[in-house]
Image (cartoon, rainbow, N blue to C red):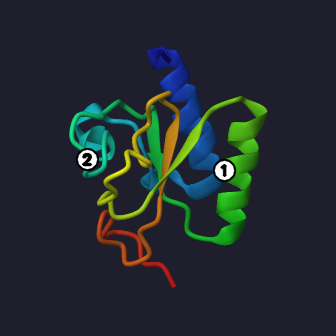
Amino acid sequence: MRTLSDTKAISADLSKIVGPVNVEVRPAALVPYRTDATFGFADWPTAVVRPGSAKEVSRILAWANERSIPVVPHGAGSSLAAGAVPVQGGIKKTFDPAGILNPGKVTQ
């Protein structure tokens, strides 16, 4: 279980990689990322990060690996195998190229 100070540090570090608008740590905003379409499996990610390029993905994964923080990919959240459930916490890396979840960011 991560503390509030851990969450703030994680948010600050990830914000340096993808910008603060692409990092979410507010509990209410994390609700959609707690689970996929699998019934009975849910847990809280520490943060959700929205990379905008392959370079950002690479930097996020390297950063998380150095700190032993799990990274869970999140697509549409429609899996029935609990593959997108952050059962060990960590960060969820969303694939949202259309900007649906973050209308303020336009991706190419």
From the viewer's perspective, is 3 left or right of 16?
Answer: left
Image quadrant of residue 58? bottom right
* Number of other residues with Cα within 10 Å of mark 2, as a class: few under 14, some 14 to 19, many 20 or more: few
Of 90 and 49, nearer the camera is 90
Distance between mark 1 and mark 2 Cα atoms: 21 Å
> What is the x, y in percent for residue 21?
43, 55
Q: Position of residue 46 (x, y in %)?
A: 45, 32
Disc 1 packing (10 Å; few <14; some 14–19; many ≥20): many
Residue depicted at x 67% and y 70%:
54
Q: Residue at x 72, y 42 (%)?
A: 63
* Residue that label 1 marks: 60
Image point (65%, 60%), residue name = 57
Measured along the vertical axis of the image, is residue 26 above or below residue 88?
below
The amino acid on which the numbered mark 1 sits, given as a three-letter code, is: Ile
Residue at position x 44%, y 75% from top?
97
Q: Residue furthest front?
A: 81
Please say if 58 is above or below 90: below
Q: Quadrant of residue 105?
A: bottom left
Q: Return the residue nearer the eye: 24 or 93.
A: 93
Q: Which residue is mark 2?
A: 32
Lower sequence index among marks 1 and 2 = 2
Residue 82: image tag: none
Q: Nearer the viewer, mark 1 or mark 2?
A: 2
Element on which disc 1 rests: helix
Query: Residue 14 in the image: x percent, y percent?
Result: 59, 44
Q: Nearer the viewer, residue 61 or 82?
A: 82
Left or right: 32, with 68 as reference point = left
| Image vertical order of residue 73 relative to residue 107, above or below | above
Q: Amino acid at mark 2?
A: Pro
Quarter of image, res 59: bottom right
User: With 91 as the anchor, is 99 left or right in this view?
Assistant: left
